[in-house]
Image: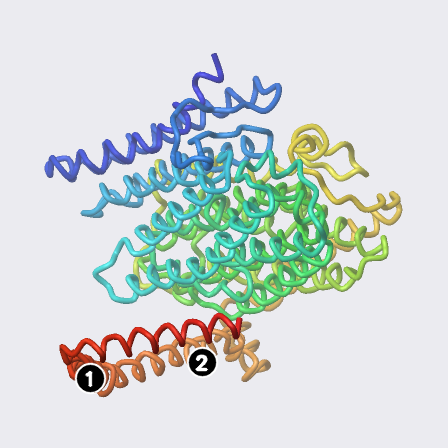
C-alpha cells in the first residue's frame, strides 16, 4: 500500500504547479485569489510530506518507483524515469517537503498583497518537485534533470520582482554561475559512463575504481557542488539571491537547493572514499569557505545578507565534515541546519514585513513589539551558535569530532579542526549574537511602528523553533548515547570513511571546547552590542580598512568583475571589431575573389583539345603512383 503512494508523493508538487500555474494563466480571475492559491500550494506539498512520513514509519528497505516509462530509449542506452527510495533519499525528501510545507504556509501571509502570487506559488511547487527528482533519482541523467530544474526554478524565484534591474541581474548571476559548476557534473557523468557503461547509481556503487580515475571524477563532481552549494570559488551567487522574496531565501538556503551539492557528495560516497586526496581538497575548500562566510557576515547590515553569508559558512562546515569522510554527520548538520536557518530567514521576513526595512541599524527592540517572532528568532540564534541542548550543538560537535578524529588518525586535518573551532564555531556565535542584539534588543531605531505577524506566519516559526530545540537528539554523540540517525538509519545507504574512534575523555574535552567557543562568542557579542550601534561603531573604528575589505568579500567579487567579466567583454569587443572589419567584409570578399580566380583557371583548362585531356590524366596518374610509393 505504501509503495503505491510513492509516485503520488513525488508527483503532487508537479500537479500543484500545473494546476496553479495553468489555471491562473487561463482564468485571470483566479490570480486575485491569493490565499486560495497559497493554500492549494501548501496542501499539495503537505500531502507529499505526509506520504513520505508514512513511508518513513513503514520503511523496511530500499524501494524502486518504476513503470513511469523511459526518458531516453536509444539502444543500447536506455534511461528509465525511475526513482530509488533508500534511507538517505527518503530522509532528504522528508526535509525538503516538511520544511517546504512550512515555508509555503508562511508564504500565504507574506505574499497575500503581491499581484504575481500565482506565479510565485506555481514556481515554489515546481521547485519542490525538481528537488525531489534530484534526491530520489535512480540514475545520474535523471539526477541532472532535477539538478537543472532546481536551477531554473531558483532563477524564476530569485528574479520574482524582475521589474527591478538588480533583481533580474541577481537571478541571471545565480543561473550563470551554477551553469559553470554544471559542466563538472556533465563531464563526470560522461567519464563514469565511458568507464562503466552505465548511468545507474546503484550499479556504479558496486564498481571498483582506480585511484587516479576516482580523483579526477570526484573533483569534477565537487566542481558541480561548489556551484550549487556555494563553495569557493563559485559562492558569489548566493548573497545576491537575497533579491527574491524572503520565503524564497529560506527555501533556497535552508533545506533544498544549497544542500544539493552535499547530497551529491554523500550519494557518490563510494567514489570519494576511493580518492582520499580529493576528500582532503573537499575538506580544505569547505573550511576556507566557512571562514570566509563567517568573516564577511560580521560586517553586513542587511539582515538577509548576514544570514546569506551564514549559510555560505555553514555549508562550508558541512563540506569539511564530508572531507573527513563523515558523510552522515554532514547530512545530520543538513537536518539541524534546515530547522534553525529556515527559522532565522522566516523570522527576518517577519521583521522586514513589520519595519519595511532590511537594515539592522533601523531595527532594535523588536522583541518587545513582536514577542513570538523575537523569541523564536533568539532560539534560532542560540541553536546555530551551538549551545546545548539545542540542535546546532549536536551536529556542530559531531563535525568537529569527526575532523579531529581524522587528524588523530594521521591525516593532515588537524588544521581543519582548529579552523572550525576558532574560526567557525566562535565566529558564528559572535556574528549571530551581534545580529540578535542589534535587531531584537535595545531601543527601536526605525520609523514605522512594528507589529507582530499574523498567525499564518508565526505558526511556522513556532514549529521550526521546536525543531531547532529537539532535532539534535536523533544524533547523540557516543559519549551521550547512540546516534540513531547515523547508526540505525543512514548506515545502510551512506558508508562513512571511518577513523578510529576517540576515547571518552578526549570527546569530553572536544565537547567542552565547542561549548566554550559558542558561549564566548555570544558573550562577547553581548558586551559589545547590547547597547546598540555604539559597539558597532567602535568595531568599525578599531578594524578600519579591515572592516571595509571584509564587507567587500576581501575583493573576490571585484576580482571576478574586473578580470573575468571585463575580460570577457574585451574579448567580445575584439571579436565584434574583428568580424565587422575583417571577417564580416574582407574575408567574404577574399573568398569570393579566390573562387572567381579558381573558376577562371579551371575554365582555361577546358580547351576541348583531346591530347590535353590525355596529358592531364597521365599527370594525375603519375602523382597517384608517386604518393603510393611515398607511403
Q: Determine the residue positioned at 48% across, 35% down.
A: 137
Check the image and name the residue furthest to the top: 1
Q: Which mark is residue 391?
A: none
Quadrant of res 86: top right
User: For the residues marked 1 and 2, what is the alpha-carbon distance in whole angstroms?
Assistant: 51 Å
Q: Residues within 10 Å of mark 2 (few under 14, many from 20)?
A: few
* Position of residue 247 measured from the top left corner of the image (x, y, whole percent): 37, 47
For mark 1, what is the residue? 601
Q: Determine the residue positioned at 63% across, 63% down.
A: 285
Q: Secondary structure at mark 1?
A: helix
Q: Determine the residue positioned at 28% across, 30% down.
A: 40
Q: Is residue 523 visible?
A: no
* Position of residue 350 measured from the top left corner of the image (x, y, whole percent): 38, 49
Q: Determine the residue positioned at 57% across, 63% down.
A: 431
* Position of residue 480 measured from the top left corner of the image (x, y, whole percent): 78, 36
For mark 2, what is the residue? 563
Decide: marks 1, 2 in contact (CB < 8 A)? no
184 and 208: which is toward the camera: 208
Q: Secondary structure at mark 2?
A: helix
Q: Residues within 10 Å of mark 1 (few under 14, many from 20)?
A: few
* Position of residue 272 measured from the top left corner of the image (x, y, whole percent): 67, 49
Quadrant of res 523: bottom right
Q: Earlier in the sequence, mark 1 or mark 2?
A: 2
Q: Is residue 446 left or right of residue 426?
A: left
With respect to residue 434, does 596 lie above or below?
below
Amino acid at each position: 500500500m505504501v509503495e503505491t503512494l510513492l509516485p503520488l508523493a513525488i508527483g503532487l508538487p508537479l500537479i500543484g504547479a500545473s494546476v496553479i500555474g495553468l489555471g491562473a494563466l487561463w482564468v485571470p480571475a483566479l490570480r486575485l485569489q491569493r490565499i486560495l492559491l497559497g493554500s492549494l500550494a501548501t496542501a499539495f506539498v503537505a500531502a507529499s510530506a505526509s506520504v513520505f512520513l508514512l513511508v518513513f514509519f513503514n520503511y523496511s528497505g530500499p524501494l524502486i518507483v518504476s513503470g513511469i516509462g523511459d526518458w531516453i530509449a536509444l539502444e543500447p542506452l536506455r534511461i528509465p524515469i525511475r526513482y530509488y527510495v533508500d534511507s538517505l533519499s527518503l530522509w532528504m525528501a522528508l526535509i525538503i517537503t516538511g520544511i517546504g510545507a512550512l515555508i509555503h504556509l508562511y508564504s500565504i501571509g507574506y505574499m497575500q498583497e503581491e499581484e504575481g502570487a500565482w506565479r510565485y506559488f506555481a514556481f515554489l511547487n515546481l521547485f519542490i518537485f525538481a528537488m525531489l527528482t534530484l534526491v530520489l533519482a535512480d540514475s545520474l541523467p535523471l539526477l541532472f534533470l532535477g539538478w537543472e530544474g532546481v536551477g531554473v526554478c531558483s532563477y524564476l524565484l530569485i528574479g520574482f520582482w524582475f521589474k527591478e534591474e538588480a533583481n533580474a541581474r541577481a537571478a541571471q548571476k545565480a543561473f550563470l554561475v551554477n551553469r559553470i559548476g554544471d559542466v563538472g557534473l556533465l563531464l563526470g557523468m560522461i567519464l563514469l559512463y565511458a568507464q562503466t557503461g552505465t548511468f545507474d547509481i546503484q550499479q556504479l556503487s558496486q564498481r571498483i575504481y582506480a585511484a587516479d580515475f576516482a580523483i579526477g571524477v570526484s573533483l569534477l563532481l565537487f566542481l558541480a557542488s561548489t556551484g550549487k552549494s556555494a563553495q569557493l570559488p563559485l559562492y558569489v551567487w548566493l548573497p545576491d539571491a537575497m533579491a527574491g522574496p524572503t520565503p524564497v531565501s529560506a527555501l533556497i538556503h535552508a533545506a533544498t537547493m544549497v544542500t544539493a551539492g552535499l547530497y551529491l557528495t554523500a550519494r557518490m560516497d563510494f567514489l570519494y572514499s576511493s580518492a582520499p586526496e580529493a576528500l582532503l581538497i573537499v575538506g580544505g575548500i569547505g573550511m576556507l569557505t566557512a571562514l570566509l562566510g563567517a568573516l564577511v557576515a560580521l560586517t553586513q547590515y542587511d539582515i538577509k545578507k548576514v544570514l546569506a553569508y551564514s549559510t555560505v559558512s555553514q555549508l562550508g562546515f558541512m563540506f569539511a565534515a564530508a572531507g573527513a569522510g563523515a558523510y552522515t554527520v554532514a547530512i545530520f548538520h543538513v537536518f539541524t541546519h534546515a530547522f534553525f536557518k529556515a527559522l532565522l530567514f522566516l523570522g527576518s521576513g517577519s521583521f522586514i514585513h513589520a519595519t519595511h526595512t532590511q537594515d539592522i541599524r533601523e531595527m532594535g527592540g523588536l522583541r518587545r513589539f513582536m514577542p513570538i517572532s523575537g523569541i523564536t528568532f533568539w532560539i534560532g540564534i542560540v541553536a546555530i551558535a551551538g549551545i546545548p541542548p539545542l540542535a546546532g550543538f549536536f551536529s556542530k560537535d559531531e563535525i568537529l569530532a569527526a575532523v579531529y578524529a581524522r587528524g588523530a588518525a594521521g591525516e593532515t586535518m588537524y588544521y581543519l579542526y582548529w579552523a572550525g573551532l576558532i574560526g567557525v564555531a566562535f565566529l558564528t556565535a559572535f556574528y549571530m549574537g551581534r545580529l540578535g542584539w542589534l535587531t531584537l534588543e535595545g531601543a527601536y531605531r526605525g520609523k514605522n511602528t512594528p507589529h507582530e505577524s499574523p498567525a499564518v506566519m508565526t505558526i511556522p516559526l513556532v514549529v521550526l523553533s521546536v525543531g531547532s530545540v529537539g532535532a539534535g537528539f536523533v544524533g547523540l554523540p557516543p559519549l551521550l548515547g547512540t546516534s540513531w540517525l547515523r547508526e540505525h538509519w543512514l548506515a545502510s545507504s551512506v558508508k562513512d570513511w571511518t577513523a578510529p574512534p576517540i576515547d571518552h575523555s578526549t570527546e569530553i574535552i572536544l565537547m567542552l571546547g565547542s561549548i566554550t567557543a559558542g558561549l564566548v562568542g555570544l558573550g562577547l557579542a553581548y558586551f559589545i552590542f547590547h547597547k546598540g550601534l555604539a559597539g558597532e561603531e567602535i568595531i568599525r573604528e578599531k578594524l578600519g580598512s579591515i572592516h571595509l575589505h571584509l564587507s567587500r568579500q576581501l575583493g573576490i567579487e571585484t576580482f571576478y568583475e574586473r578580470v573575468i567579466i571585463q575580460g570577457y567583454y574585451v574579448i567580445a569587443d575584439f571579436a565584434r571589431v574583428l568580424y565587422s572589419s575583417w571577417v564580416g567584409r574582407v574575408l567574404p570578399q577574399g573568398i569570393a575573389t579566390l573562387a572567381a580566380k579558381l573558376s577562371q583557371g579551371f575554365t582555361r583548362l577546358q580547351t576541348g583539345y583531346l591530347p590535353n585531356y590525355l596529358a592531364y590524366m597521365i599527370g594525375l596518374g603519375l602523382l597517384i603512383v608517386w604518393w603510393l610509393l611515398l607511403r
